[in-house]
Amino acid sequence: MFLAAVPVLAGVGSIGSERLVRRTSARAVLRVVQPAVCLTLAAAGLGDGLWQLALALGVFGLLVGALDASMNMLGVGLQHRYGRSIMIGFHAAFSLGAIVGAALAGIGAHYRLGLPVLFGGAAAVLVPAALLAGTRFAGPAEIGDAVQEAARAAERSIPWRPLLPLCLAMAAAYIADASVSNYSVKYLTDALASPEDVAKLSYLGYMVAMLLGRMLGDAAVQRWGAVPVVRTGAVLAALGFVVAAAAPEAVTGIAGFTLLGLGICAIIPQVFAAGGRLFPADSDAAVARLNLFNYAGFLVGSPLVGALAGAGSYRVALLAPTALILLVLPLARHFAPAPAKAL
């Protein structure tokens, strides 16, 4: 129950960050919440009572939402300044962090390290790193006029309707992501009778493919444009689900989830980039609202696949996120940059 509340509170934190950024700046919010998230992680490991765990996870959820939103706000602002795609590369760093974190968790489980050691050790490294990084965050002078104007837009409110296609694309991508993160290993062990050590390669393949795709994604957007990249990604992701669902044995299943990671890698960062282009003078507010559907997708994806697997089979259950990720195809036109105005 506590873990299910984390993404809900993260959504609250994302919307709250919109208000905080309007009063201060994305840089100021990120400087505070990034080390604070690391400290709450340590608190979750150090607590010895249920109420302490609940409190730590609640604060963690709120701060993670604000962290996600403010990081992407800064990224969108920098992309405006650079005048070219850089958001996918930013999200490559996120994928690398996820791989390193999963590896550390695996090491901790193997050597039976307690949560105080694992989480406390991580915080001891990450808090100083976050404080040091905070001194280097770009401010208005480096980011340029787009974010300076956003900071002066305190009394304006952007409409939801133009963002809805991007919100749906974000939710579909995170439903797919939650399906893989929660059920890829279980699918291989239960449906394909794979040893657990082999089954874990399904999620590793997914994350490595996502990392490699994001390292190359900005160059692909520069060459072919956001719309073709997003559409190609949606097709590859759907194909990955189909390959995994039809897999007769573990190797094919792992290949399917790996293909899925390659397909989905560019969709999420391009949602944020498109939202920033849609409202260049209020990109911070657009990012905060889009970020809500990160958590909405996570909340829907895992229960959806779990319920369908319980009612039928994992093979059938994987077809639901397949259909949802294909919805990105008609939505992809909303990722196109606005045409330049005639002089």
Image (spheres, rainbow, N blue to C red):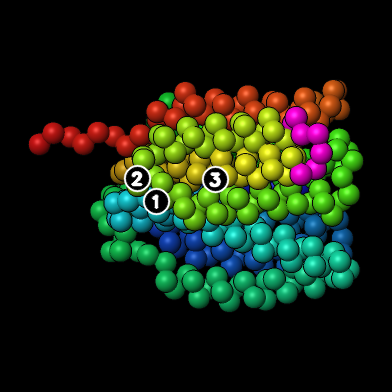
Task: Count neighbours of disc 1 (C-alpha within 10 A) and say few if under 14, some if 14 to 19, many if 20 or more.
Answer: some
Q: Earlier in the sequence, mark 2 or mark 3?
A: 2
Query: Is 287 rendered above or below residue 235?
Result: below
Residue picked out by circle 2:
223
Q: Secondary structure at mark 2?
A: helix
Q: Nearer the viewer, residue 26 or 119?
A: 119
* Amino acid type of the residue tagged 3 in the rendering: Cys
The dot on residue 265 is: 3
The residue that appears at 68% across and 39% down in the rendered structure is 256
**Residue 51 visible:** yes
Q: Could you say which quadrant of the image residue 25 lies in? A: bottom left
Residue 163 left/right relative to 174: left
Task: Count neighbours of disc 3 (C-alpha within 10 A) and say few if under 14, some if 14 to 19, many if 20 or more.
Answer: many
Q: Magenta span has 228? A: no
Q: Magenta span has 250? A: yes
Total marks shown come to 3
* Residue 103 picture location, percent across and down: 73, 63
Residue at mark 3 to residue at mark 1: CA–CA distance: 13 Å
The magenta segment is 245-251
Residue picked out by circle 1:
219
Label 3 vs label 1, nearer the camera:
1
Pointer 2 with pointer 1, Cβ within 8 A: yes
Residue at mark 2 to residue at mark 3: CA–CA distance: 17 Å
* Amino acid type of the residue tagged 2 in the rendering: Arg
Q: Earlier in the sequence, mark 3 or mark 1?
A: 1
Pointer 3 with pointer 1, Cβ within 8 A: no
The residue that appears at 62% across and 40% down in the rendered structure is 260
* Residue 57 picture location, percent across and down: 73, 54
